[in-house]
Image (cartoon, grey):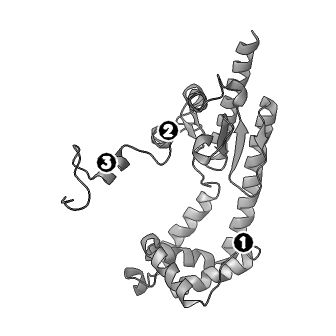
Amino acid sequence: MNTTGSQEDTANGLSRRGSNASQSQVRSDTDLFYEAMANLHHHEDNPSGALPMNVAENKLGWTELKAKIEAISASQPLPDWVAGYTGAKGNPEVLAVLAEFMSTHLAQRELIYSRNPAFNRAADNLNVAHMASNLTQWTIQQVLADHAFVDAFISNNRKRLTESYIEVVEALRRSGIPYVPSRGSLFVWADFSEFLEDQTEAADHQLWLRIYDATGILLTPGAGFGHTKHGMYRIVYPSLPRTSVHAALSRLEALVMGWREVETA
């Protein structure tokens, strides 16, 4: 790659920007996340496996959503517009279905509607590099157009999120671990600061690693989110099946109780 006039090549054959990117991480838990995913817990096939609860994703409704997407792909013909660009904001047909969904289910959320040409042009330009593929847009359109499915999915998802949240906070209460109550979210911030060796960022990182090494539970370190209090870690409770969440909480309770017994011995 010729970088003459811009950035000099480094010893590894990359530009300065590329070299810096190869030596830095956006998140400090990325490597351990991939390690945990390669040894993922399963209540029957791998009961001693790892339990990554550090990525903000909701898998509680994936069984139904997967079945719906598979049924759509098997029964619905693809329109020709899927093969090309349809506008930086998205395909008009998709936007119409999305607008109906948002007006029905997100009526109290803050949205932007503008006829300002400059604003819309700016939005187009900014979105070009982040456009969803047309195949993804079409699939979302088909899912959202099925109102009965969407209503049932949202209802079931809310119920499952609540059940998972209750299970997590009850385990934290039994363990005497303070936490920040969650409202309309996918995670709980738990306070493990009583187990810090000292009030430093290094001790915070070391405690996070100790929890993972001892239990296989990978939490999100708070340092990357600007937490000023050390020992705050995020538990993403819908990121795993309920059987795996139950296993994680059992391991976590046992760890906390064991640490306290050592401290009082």
Amino acid type at mark 2? Ala
Percent x, y for residue 105? 73, 74
User: Label 1: few (<14), some or many (≥20) within 10 Å?
Assistant: few
Task: Choose mark 2 or mark 3, whichever is in front.
Answer: 3
Q: Nearer the viewer, mark 1 or mark 2?
A: 2
Residue 244 lies, in percent from the top left, at 63, 40
Disc 2 and disc 3: Cα gap in Å?
A: 27 Å
Identify the mark at residue 19; answer none if there is no mark. Answer: 3
* Upstream in sequence: badge 2 or badge 3: 3
The answer for how far apart the CA atoms under marks 3 and 1 are is 48 Å
**Quadrant of the image occupied by residue 210:** top right
Q: Is residue 194 above or below residue 72?
A: above
State how many labels appear: 3
> Vertical placement of 3 versus 213: above or below?
below
Q: Quadrant of the C terminus?
A: top right
Q: Which residue is mark 2?
A: 36
- Say which quadrant the N terminus sits in: bottom left
Q: What is the three-letter code of the residue carrying label 3? A: Ser
Return the residue nearer the eye: 24 or 135: 24
Reading the image, the residue beneath label 1 is 151
